[in-house]
Image: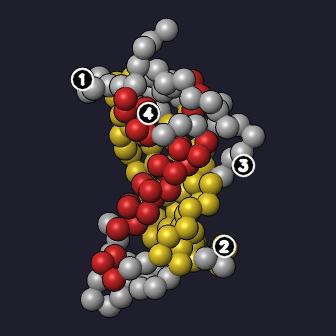
Amino acid sequence: MDPREPKPETKASQPVELLFECKVYYEDTDCMGVVYHANYLRYLERARTEYVEQRLASVVEYHKNGYMFMVHKIEIVYHSPAKLGDALVVRTWIENTTRFRIVVKQIITKKGEPRDYLITATVTLVAVGLDGELLQIPREFHEL
């Protein structure tokens, strides 16, 4: 068994999708009070981190065990802008996995308006070791 592989307790009984709530602050916006496009990446990253921590184990534990998760590819469609003061909900789930990739789907909406998408994203992650070499995705991700 690879000593770098974490042995978290899989919380498989939890829902497949995670809802992560956040708020748009002044620092997130441009001069017109609209969220700057790159700041959506922060919301998506925070939601993915919470997803892993709630469904599997702390990202810190994965790091301690030699796994660093990196974005390999990201596709974002901007449907409608979020604005200063908006309460947002980021929906996150794993769409599929392969031996070396995790494909995550994410949708951002305004809280209370779940059918009006602001952002839809597909994020492909890979795992690398401390040496930067590509690693196989830990088995527990395939179970999600």
| Cα separation between marks 1 and 4 | 17 Å
Q: Residue 78 appears at what percent x and percent y? A: 45, 70
| Cα separation between marks 2 and 4 | 33 Å
| Cα separation between marks 4 and 3 | 22 Å
Type of amino acid under label 2: Pro
| Cα separation between marks 2 and 1 | 42 Å
The answer to whether mark 1 and mark 4 are in CB contact below 8 A is: no
Q: Nearer the viewer, mark 3 or mark 2?
A: 3
Q: Residues within 10 Å of mark 3 (few under 14, many from 20)?
A: few
Question: Label 4 belongs to which residue?
Answer: 61
| Disc nearer the start of the sequence (4/3) | 3
Q: Is residue 47 above or below residue 9?
A: below
Question: Label 3 belongs to which residue?
Answer: 15
The answer to whether mark 3 and mark 2 are in CB contact below 8 A is: no
The residue positioned farthest toward the bottom in the image shown: 32
| Disc nearer the start of the sequence (1/4) | 4
Question: Label 2 belongs to which residue?
Answer: 114
Q: Nearer the viewer, residue 94 or 66?
A: 66
Question: Label 1 belongs to which residue?
Answer: 131
